């Protein structure tokens, strides 16, 4: 999987889960879609942040001594 495609896929998955959960509570459809879109955006941004943190953790630190 391409690195640029992974955050999009994870964001969509989070959005779909949130839409499903809100539909269980009989929230109106438009509200469910808004909540799902915001959750997808958050999932996308979180995925990018986690990838950057993982890359920084795997980097070998420079020795100053």
Image (tube, rainbow, N blue to C red):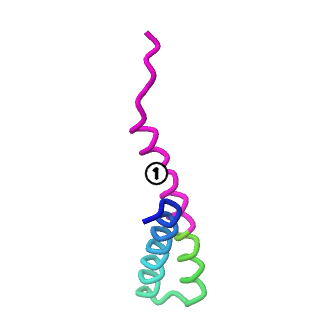
Structural crowding at the residue carrying mark 1, measured as other residues with C-alpha within 10 Å and reported as few (<14), some (14–19) or many (≥20): some
Quarter location, residue 10: bottom left
Q: Is residue 8 magenta?
A: no
Residue furthest to the top in view is 65
Q: As displayed, is residue 43 above or below residue 32?
A: above
Considering the image in quadrants, where does the N terminus appear? bottom left
Considering the image in quadrants, where does the C terminus appear? top left
The range drawn in magenta is 41-65
Q: Which residue is mark 1?
A: 51
Q: As rendered, which of 28 and 3 lies closer to the eye?
A: 3
Quarter location, residue 32: bottom right
Residue 55 screen position, x and y as percent:
44, 43
Q: As rendered, which of 64 and 21 lies closer to the eye?
A: 64
Q: As rendered, which of 6 and 31 lies closer to the eye?
A: 6
Q: Is residue 42 magenta?
A: yes
Report the number of numbered marks. Answer: 1
Q: Residue visible at 60% across and 79% down?
A: 34
Is 22 situated left or right of 31 in this image? Answer: left
- In what element is the residue under mark 1? helix
Q: As displayed, is residue 11 above or below residue 27?
A: above
Q: Residue visible at 44% across and 74% down?
A: 13
Q: Residue visible at 42% across and 45% down?
A: 54
Residue furthest to the front in view is 2
Residue 23 screen position, x and y as percent:
45, 87
Q: As displayed, is residue 60 above or below residue 34?
A: above
Residue 14 screen position, x and y as percent:
45, 71
Q: Residue visible at 42% across and 80% down?
A: 21
Per the picture, the main secondary structure of the magenta-coloured stretch is helix
């Amino acid at each position: 999987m391409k690195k640029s495609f992974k955050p999009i896929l994870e964001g969509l998955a989070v959005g779909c889960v949130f839409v499903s959960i809100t539909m269980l509570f009989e929230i109106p459809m438009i509200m469910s879609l808004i909540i799902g879109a915001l959750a997808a955006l958050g999932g996308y941004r979180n995925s990018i942040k986690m990838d950057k943190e993982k890359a920084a953790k795997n980097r070998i630190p420079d020795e100053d001594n």
